[in-house]
Amino acid sequence: MTKKQKKLLTRVIIGCVLFAAVYITQKLSDLNQYIYLAMYLVPYFVTGWDVLYKCVKGIIRGDFLDEAFLMSLATVGALIIGDYPESVFVMVFYQVGELFQSLAVERSRRSISALMDIRPDSATVLRDGVEEEMLPEEVCPGDTIVVRPGEKIPVDGSVLDGTSALDTKALTGESVPMDVKPGDKVVSGSINMSGILKITAEKSYGESSVAKILELVENSSLNKAKSENFITKFAKYYTPAVVIGALILATIPSIITKDPKTWISRALIFLVVSCPCALVISVPLSFFGGIGGASAKGILIKGANFLEALNNTQTVVFDKTGTLTTGTFTVTEVLPSNGFTKETLLKYSSSAEYYSNHPIAVSLKAAASGSASEPQDTKEISGFGIDASVDGKRVLCGNHKLMDSNGIKYERLSKGGTVVYTAVDGVYAGAAVIEDTVKPTSAEALRALKAEGVTKTVMLTGDRKEAAEAVNAKLGLSEIHYELLPEDKVRVMDGICKSKDKKSTVVFVGDGINDAPVLTRADVGIAMGALGSDAAIEAADMVIMDDDPAKIATAIKISRKTRRIVTENVVFALSVKFAVLILAAFGLTNMWIGVLADVGVAVLAILNAMRNLKVK
């Protein structure tokens, strides 16, 4: 418990003991009613002084129609008409409910605070052979960081020296440690489990994974779901309506029957029962729990509105490379032409791609075995390839569209992989066939989506028809669109969104820079976070930290469970409250039952909402 919660628990216990003592004294003695009033006021104020204080502050501000006002009005009214035990009982049990709600919210917050523990406290930087301890924010790209066992990696980088196993569970939800060696990329927030690592910082703290993750989680509460906004608006009108209803119940029948005590008592019960805290707390708690449960699985959701939107998912659109496939490319064939050898073809191709970190470029440079030379000038043509100057020669390296647009005479190849064509000084030098592999979980992901009721799966790719069809043969998507430029992907995505049912949701999943415009077009955009670009992660509404497409179905399952819990709580709370309100109006219940109906409903609704913290 927090310090505040412990204080409230202490006050509740003292209040209960004092209330029991006064109640027993009243039953065993015959004193003046004002003495009993004074005695009951002690546990009343011990337990509920903060509720009264909040009510008074609200009245002064002119914003007082909340549960504190309802409870204060009901309990003070009960004291005035002589129902002393009922008044104290209402206040004590209301505070018991408040304590329970606070504990429930704190438990939900802890499920996310486990993620917040990925924030590194400090960094050990090696400068001029001397270790300096500093804040992660002070680390600069290029610095050498020393990370010992048990410490968190402060910024993104690559291993310079040492081997170890990293605990990435808080980042990805994956419990199996990740082994790293020199040359491997590592992300901030990972915990070093064994050997000492020397890491070259590649990003500042503000640009590192840990900072971006924390920013996403901290801002997730700003984007409320429609259900949350509805409950907020509902409470705004519901509370004044209840107060007016109680006022009418207390006055008009009193005038007619000339029995004000009976009707005022019924009106006070009416106020107690009507308290909307069960809805106001349980609905946001359900979404908060859903976001926390998803975070534990390595799925970061930027707001409850996106979690709720997933509930109606009917169409999921995928990028291919790095999303359904691993993005790990290998050169499988080298086909030189016009007198060029395999070695010279690879040299010119890899030199043109010298500055690119695209997986295809990386595979070409690996196949060239270090023969690539730094180009004098490069120009990237989006959707086509690279135009570069290598050793004084103009080199074109890209797809068939690049060859066509420059009038190069070449033989177009039909291969299952990606074909990269190269021309040197206007002469076709040959082609390299590069193949990607389908992720092991991609087929499982599509089966899981179908099981969750997704009726349409689509793949968009800039790759050739043959490569796209080779992937689809293994996965069996509903539709594939290939040889798309970035603007073509946007056009196709717009068409899918326009043709959908108004109540359904279209999800797009991607990882590259050119996916950012498409991510913003979808109802919910999901970025692959481990290998994905910063631009895609910024544009997305959700981030899957370990790049596992199977977690899309997990996110949809969490969304539907959240929606089901919210519906259960709203229907249950309103049904019980309206039933007891009617009974109270006809005098068929009392204050004791009224407070149990209020606090009991709130506790049951909160317990139901807390089920969302557990994700299978």
Image (cartoon, grey):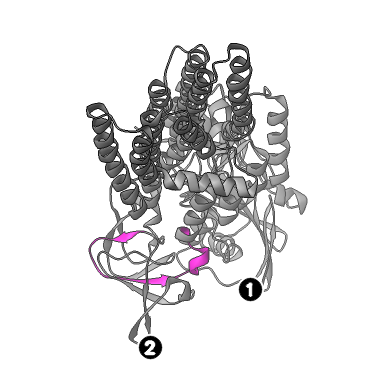
Instruction: Check the image and report above or below for 392 versus 275.
Output: below
Verify CB contact (< 8 Å) between mark 1 and mark 2.
Answer: no
Instruction: Check the image and report above or below for 355 versus 433.
Output: below
* Residue 302 in sight: no
Q: Residue at x 47, y 17 (%)?
A: 580
Query: Mark 2 is on which residue type?
Result: Asp
Query: Mark 1 is on which residue type?
Result: Asp
Nearer to us in this view, 607 or 387: 607
- Residue 188, horizontal then vertical, whole percent: 41, 62
In front: label 1 or label 2: 2
Q: Which mark is residue 66?
A: none
Query: Residue 561 falls in which quadrant of the image?
Result: top left
Q: Which mark is residue 391?
A: 1
Q: Residue at x 45, y 21 (%)?
A: 451
Q: Residue at x 26, y 64 (%)?
A: 150
Q: Is residue 422 left or right of residue 325?
A: right
- Residue 454, horizontal then vertical, whole percent: 53, 24
Mark sitting earlier along the chain (1/2):
2
Q: Check disc 1 and report its element: helix, strand or loop.
A: loop
Q: Which residue is mark 2?
A: 128
Nearer to us in this view, 293 or 82: 82
Nearer to us in this view, 532 or 29: 29
204 is within the stretch colored magenta? yes
Instruction: Check the image and report above or below for 421 versus 442.
Output: below
Query: Residue 228 falls in which quadrant of the image?
Result: top right
The part of the chain drawn in magenta is: 190-209
Q: Check disc 2 and report its element: helix, strand or loop.
A: loop
- Crowding at dot 2, Cα within 10 Å, few <14 / some 14-19 / many 20+, comes out as few
Q: Residue at x 50, y 53 (%)?
A: 218
* Residue 537 in sight: yes
Residue at mark 1 to residue at mark 2: CA–CA distance: 38 Å
